[in-house]
């Protein structure tokens, strides 16, 4: 993989020395279908969101399978002394929520994709509010990026991080040791949207396809049938 899609060797080593041992220590691994993850080229990793520990655990999975995860993070993080420098050096992309500046994150993401990067995207925008923790209705950022760039979207579902650190809690539940499950799905087929205006219904339908692909992988991990209609916090 080309170096432009990865941080400097110093910062990559720094992150790996911290994240990998921490991840191995915190959870057991049940990783499935990693062969479906492209080992090169620009790709969008679309995944569900259950816990604040997700970025660390999913990043470990991606790194162990040949991809450096490029994460979108709240812009406020970049303004924290030292931490901001670290996340910027690790190629994280700042997102200004509720601002016209949010479009800049997509422009930076497109450049990273052209450099062969793997952009990790949480289409829900936040941890799911579904009472049974199924993926919610997604926001359109990931589909917009995919249709604008032509990049492949790989759906990745995970399960177990919510047992380690439930959403809203600050203290992890370390014992008994939890199992972190990951399942990679086939690329999402967005070909029917090619040539159509990247707006409105097209974005909503493409987003629904991406979320459906993530949900299918999660249903496999959980061994349960997913709800036919995803939870929509706007109508709850």
Image (cartoon, rainbow, N blue to C red):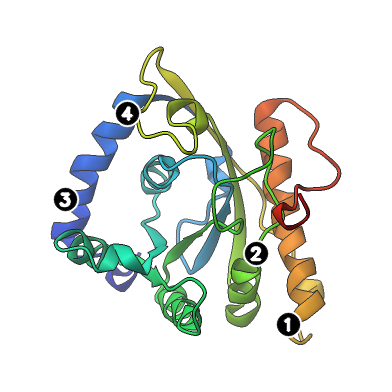
Q: Nearer the viewer, mark 1 or mark 3?
A: 1
Residue 190 visible within the image: no
**What residue is shown with label 4?**
24
Residue appearing at x 65%, y 69% in the figure? 140
Q: Relative to residue 88, is residue 106 drawn left or right?
A: right
Q: Is residue 59 above or below residue 144?
A: above
Give the Cα separation between the discs numbered 3 and 4: 16 Å
Percent of width and height locating residue 34: 53, 42
Find disc 3 in the rendering and name its residue: 14
Of the image marks 2 and 3, the number of the one nearer the N terminus:
3
Measure the C-alpha gap from mark 4 to mark 2. 32 Å
Left/right placement of residue 204 relative to residue 165 reads right
Q: Which mark is residue 33?
A: none
Write down the quadrant of residue 10 in the picture: bottom left
The residue tagged 2 is: 139
| Mark nearer the N terminus (2 vs 1) | 2
**Label 2 element class:** loop
* Disc ID at residue 199: 1
């Amino acid at each position: 993989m080309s170096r432009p899609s990865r941080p400097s060797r110093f910062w990559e080593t720094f992150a790996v020395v911290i994240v990998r041992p921490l991840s191995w220590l915190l959870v057991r691994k049940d990783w499935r279908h990693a062969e479906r993850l492209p080992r090169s080229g620009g790709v969008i990793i679309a995944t569900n969101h259950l816990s604040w520990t997700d970025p660390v655990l999913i990043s470990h999975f991606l790194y162990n399978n040949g991809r450096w995860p490029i994460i979108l993070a709240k812009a406020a993080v970049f303004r924290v002394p030292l931490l901001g420098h670290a996340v910027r050096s690790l190629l994280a992309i700042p997102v200004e929520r509720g601002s016209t500046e949010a479009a800049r994150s997509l422009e930076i993401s497109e450049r990273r994709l052209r450099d062969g990067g793997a952009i990790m995207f949480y289409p829900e925008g936040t941890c799911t509010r579904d009472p049974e923790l199924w993926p919610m209705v997604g926001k359109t950022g990931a589909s917009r990026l995919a249709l604008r760039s032509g990049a492949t979207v790989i759906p990745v579902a995970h399960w177990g991080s919510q047992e380690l650190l439930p959403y809203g809690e600050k203290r992890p539940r370390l014992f008994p040791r939890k199992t972190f499950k990951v399942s990679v799905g086939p690329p999402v087929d967005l070909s029917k949207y090619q040539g159509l205006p990247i707006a409105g219904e097209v974005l909503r339908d493409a987003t629904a396809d991406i979320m459906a692909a993530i949900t299918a992988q999660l249903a496999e991990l959980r061994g349960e049938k997913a709800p036919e209609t995803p939870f929509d916090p706007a109508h709850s």
